[in-house]
Image (cartoon, rainbow, N blue to C red):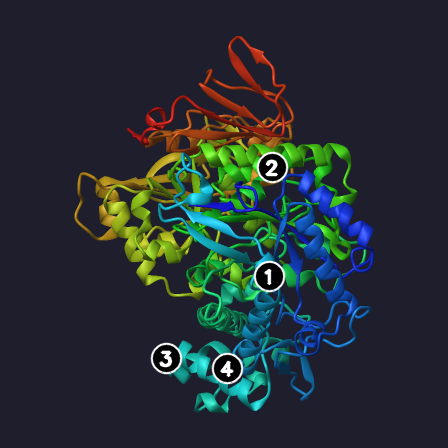
Amino acid sequence: MQLISKTDNRPYMNVIFGNFYSPAFDNEEFVDKTMGLIRDLGFNSVMFDTKAWEDFKERFETGALSQYVKMQEYMGGSAHRHGLAYNFLLLYLNGDNLYPHIRFSPPIFGEETVYLDGRPGRWYKYWSKKAQISMKEHVDRIMKQYGQGCERCLTGEIDQGKDRQDMNNGAKEVIPVCSMWDPVVAPSFDKEGQKRYLDYLRELYKGDIKSLNHNYETELEKFDDLTPKEYWYSVRFGSDSFYTEEDVKKRSPKFWVWRDNALWKIHELTLYFEKIVQMLKENNPELLLCPDMSQWGYFLNIYGRTQQDIDNEFSDLWDTAMRGIDIYALAPYVDSCHFITVPVTPDGYPDSYVVSCQHSMMRVMNQGKPFIGGIYWGRYIYNDLYALLSPSEIIGSMTACGIDGYTCYGMNGLDDGGVMNRMDTHFLDSLRMANEWFSQVICLRKGEKKKEIAILFPSEMAHLEPYEVGNNKIRRLDLLGWYKLCCDLGYQVDVISNHEIEKGTLAEYKVLIVPSNDCYFAVDHAAMEKEIRSWVCKGGVLLHGPRDLLAENCFGIQGEECEKKPYHYGKTIIAQGEAFCRYQDGKEIASYVDHGGCCVAKYEKLELAQKMNTKYKSGMGAVYSFGIQIGASYAAKNIPHVPYEQGNKEMYPIIQSGTTLVKDILYHYMTPVSGICERGIETGVFENGMVVVNHRSIPYVLPEKYKIEKYQYSFHAVQNGNGILAGHEAVWVSNDTTGDDYGENKIK
């Protein structure tokens, strides 16, 4: 589904430009210069940070112009003078006034939460009728005052052969707005807030107080007897105390109270979005609501506390497990599900695959909707990312993921490294050419990205397990590693959730990979497990790691924990990660050294049918059980020793070991539709061509000469009839416009 700006008939390309800091706050010359830069870089719209402060209330009611409002109105005029449209980040209900030098009072429209001692809380009640009405009023007033100058886009299946200004083929005109930014749900300990939480607990436990008493180790007679001292984690256990891995294993009260708190946040935010979207469109049905659900990524966001010289009390705010945001669950209630990505791993290393992986999540969230990508440009607060990566490869990767347009963050947000206007000329040149290339490729691309492999998003671990719990960074990297490995093997990869599986989407994939999720037990997934069993019975192939409860629940496959050992597959491979187990049955694919048992087992045919307690059918698929964390090993940066007793004193990570274990398994069932299998080469295959992204520092020679080769840089060399793709860049290639050369997956 395309999203074409009516400003210049190009894809929607938007940059957030805040004016809450000087010089944008009070320097008109700077604003004009920056608008010129934005236009020169190829963007067609600017998003203003229109906070719901009393400044705008005064403007609407009295006409008074604070410096903040005055400058934003000037910015609107400047945008138009530079051939740009504008739209709004309608920021409300997510925190106190972060900029007291502008206004000393917090936003006045919301209804604050209440601390245990009765003081007003920092955050706001999302369930408050007063708050929701005030949000609607803010949006209505902004659109009435400034809506005429807003960015307008055409969305739908737009016929490229027609004048986009005269569409009659079902294209719809919309106004994209960012209707929320980085929401934070917090409890309220007033009478209303406590009742609301107890009602939630009563529903969660289906009225069974005995079940809650068992989890909490309490002896309460009814739910109304609960107080915050029993039910809220920070009150009961302390604000600086996290549960541990041992609490997870033992299912202690610490874990269960934390779980219930986290699920409540997800519950409240889902209810909020379900209701507010309808309210915001009552007077403005043309709005395309695309809230930014997270400022610094999702699940793979950086663990900030370890990246700074001094402790940052707000670093944990960006941790997915602290937020209570299940973006997959929220997707049905917004017009485009969106968050900002940053090309950095949780441990602070620049990695473009993080952007690709997270945009794969967004692609799944936006099936049948405009897909607006999100990226951070600038010097990230913890690392100078773009000294090692390029805007060209990042935009190439987002394009390979299927975005229809994108919003970027980083212009004049001086509190968080948003210094796009100060980036060097090499960065700006790369961004400029990449934006131009993207706008051309979108016009060429037809259809959706092909589907081959699905990776199950570890929802429970993402939403419940903070970074502070054990070595959670490694467990989170298991998802990223599997994603990278499959991309390097040439496959098209979707990161899906339980929500999609329950709707029957597994039928679109041949392979499902289940990465680490040590909190899987915390939520009942009977419906999803039923779908997975049925899918495997019909020919699906599932891969999972050690101690996987999904595999145990679905297939009765249960590994036995064992000590860390290298394993054999052709040659000795280093076993990395933190979880190891062996399997007593199944066909042995790889074994631990020194007769340590089966490391990788295959279950199929009669054996699998027996495990599933069902009749064997000829079309039944297979389950591969891994005793090591392949994904975490593939993404890891550490280089462990091979034990001396193995006669090998070398140190090397699994990615350099030369193993073909996963490749041999996957290629047995499906040849990659891309036809490319190279480490560091990412592909996005569509109906009539594909995007090829070179994440390496060395050039890549395309395997054949295509009829169309559209590079980001126009001066690429040609050698022996083949195009040369430089490092950290992307290219669009196709042989024709029908898509025949990229047909369906070849199933062996």
Separation of residues labelled 2 and 1 (CA atoms): 36 Å
* Label 3 element class: loop
Residue at 74% from the left image edge and 42% from the top image edge = 384
Are the residues flagged by discs 2 and 1 in contact, CB closer than 8 Å? no
Q: Residue 5 location in percent, x, y?
A: 53, 46
Query: In the picture, which quadrant includes the N terminus?
Result: top left
Question: Mark 3 or 2 closer to N-term?
Answer: 3
Q: Nearer the viewer, mark 2 or mark 1?
A: 2
Three-letter amino acid code at the position of disc 3: Lys
Q: Nearer the viewer, mark 2 or mark 4?
A: 2
| Badge 2: residue crowd in 10 Å (few <14, some 14–19, many ≥20) | many
Residue designated by label 2: 435
Q: Is residue 72 left or right of residue 23?
A: left
Residue 708 appears in the figure: yes
Question: Mark 3 or 4 closer to N-term?
Answer: 4
Are the residues flagged by discs 1 and 3 in contact, CB closer than 8 Å? no
* Label 2 element class: helix
Residue that protrudes farthest toward the top in the picture: 720
Q: Is residue 611 left or right of residue 165?
A: left
Residue 478 appears in the figure: no
* Label 1 element class: loop
Three-letter amino acid code at the position of disc 4: Tyr
| Badge 3: residue crowd in 10 Å (few <14, some 14–19, many ≥20) | few
Query: In the picture, which quadrant includes the C terminus?
Result: top left
Q: Is residue 286 left or right of residue 608?
A: right
Residue designated by label 4: 197
Q: Nearer the viewer, mark 1 or mark 4?
A: 4
Separation of residues labelled 1 and 4 (CA atoms): 22 Å
Are the residues flagged by discs 3 and 4 in contact, CB closer than 8 Å? no
